[in-house]
Amino acid sequence: MSDRPILQVWGAEHRFDDRMILRGVDLKVRQGEIYALLGPNGAGKSTLVRAVCGRLKLTGGEVALDDKDPWSNPAARRVVGVVPQDLALYPHLTVRENLETFGRLSGVKGRALQDAVRQALRLTRTEDREHAPVGHLSGGYKRRVNIGAAILHQPKLLILDEPTVGVDIDARAALDSVIRALRDMGTAVLVVTHDLDQAGGLADRVGFLREGRKVLEGAPHALIEQAFGAEMEILVELSVEADAATEAALAGEGLTRREGDGLWTRLDAGGYAAAGRLDKRLRRAGVVPREIRVREPSLQNLFTLVAEWRRAA
Ligand SMILES: Nc1ncnc2c1ncn2[C@@H]1O[C@H](COP(=O)(O)OP(=O)(O)OP(=O)(O)O)[C@@H](O)[C@H]1O
Ligand SMILES: [Mg+2]
């Protein structure tokens, strides 16, 4: 990884009417680095991304893309490729035709366009569908073509907004490996996501944005180790839907129910031994877990912890 930041943001501030949306955010993304920008709805992620792309003029602070201001300098905007959250492809055109069209739109022509299309097909692993209409492809392929359309002008910074929404696990893994391949070629990657599992596995660094401020930043593993030390996460999966008595028993053990997958979890420095004791106590209370897992805390745990710090502060 090179030390040269492709993207630099200093003290970004933004006010919509009289609401402060960004309150002094610094950000650096370097060549060959994947940076995941995380944060709850309304934290200001998309506003920051719009400023980075030169689509919004900040009310305070500065942005430099390859040392140029993207708002006042159109050349700076060519440094970035944006993969929008919604698919922006022509369903009736084939993959190749889509890429050729987007390449022309970003000013690539002739021989260079043919080379760029070939490289995009290869990098996004969509060569085997080159002549299929995009409308016939699976969701995962469409997402990869969407990335292909954003890299034809060989941007130094690729920005992806919520790339995994509506994508299944297998397709997500394929998407991650495409993003890594681009990083390994030296592209700087900024991923905006709610998907903490994806961010934890993919990003070299993550930053949490909250109410317009960056509240935490670093390498996922280091952040998790700092915050949790020896604590492990215990996850309990039930074989049947919990009734009121079961919920009370689980809550009595300090477990909370996760949104999304419905697993019950808690942190515990006792690791596997603590999980074994928990299993015995739950069974005595008439709760039969289907499975109890022990694992290293995730970014999800860290995110919850940060939310608690904020409430306590
Ligand atoms: N053009 C606008 N005018 C006024 N307020 C806006 C405008 N765009 C965004 N906002 C507000 O700014 C805040 C931050 O929005 P932003 O889209 O940056 O959040 P986000 O972190 O991307 O959230 P999400 O995860 O939901 O995409 C929100 O409260 C939003 O309502
Ligand atoms: Mg957003």
Image (cartoon, helix red, strand yellow):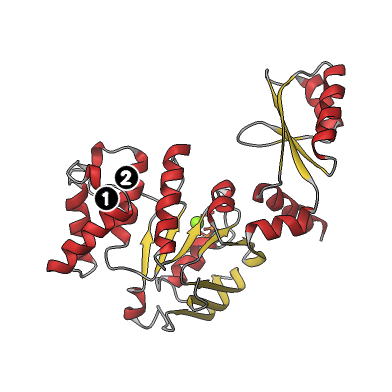
Sooner in the amino-acid sequence: mark 1 or mark 2? 1
Residue at 42%, 56% (x, y): give it. 179
Determine whether 68 is above or below 2 in the image. below
User: Tag 1, which secondary structure?
Assistant: loop
Q: Residue furthest top?
A: 286
Q: Which residue is mark 2?
A: 142
Left or right of residue 12, residue 116 in this image: left
Picture quadrant where residue 91 is located? top left
Q: Position of residue 23 (x, y in %)?
A: 62, 72
Q: Which residue does the image show at 47% across and 66% down from the upper left?
A: 49
Viewer-proximal residue, 103 or 202?
202
Can you tell which mark lies on residue 147?
Answer: none
Q: Residue at x 28, y 47 (%)?
A: 126
Q: Is residue 99 above or below residue 56?
A: above
In the picture, which quadrant includes the C terminus? bottom right
Q: Amino acid at mark 1?
A: Leu
Question: What residue does disc 1 label?
Answer: 89
Left or right, 126 with respect to 197, comes to: left
Res. 204 visible in picture: yes
Position of residue 267 measured from the top left corner of the image (x, y, whole percent):
79, 42
Mark 2 Cα-neighbour bin, 10 Å: few <14, some 14–19, many ≥20: many
Q: Where is 302 relative to 62, above or below?
A: above
Helix, strand, or loop for circle 2? helix
Q: Amino acid at mark 2?
A: Lys
Percent from the top left, x then y, of residue 33? 50, 66
Classify 10 Å Cα crowding around label 1: few (below 14), some (14-19), many (20 and above). many
Residue 253, percent across and down? 85, 32
Q: CB of mark 1 within 8 Å of CB of mark 2? A: yes
Does residue 102 appear anywhere in the picture?
no
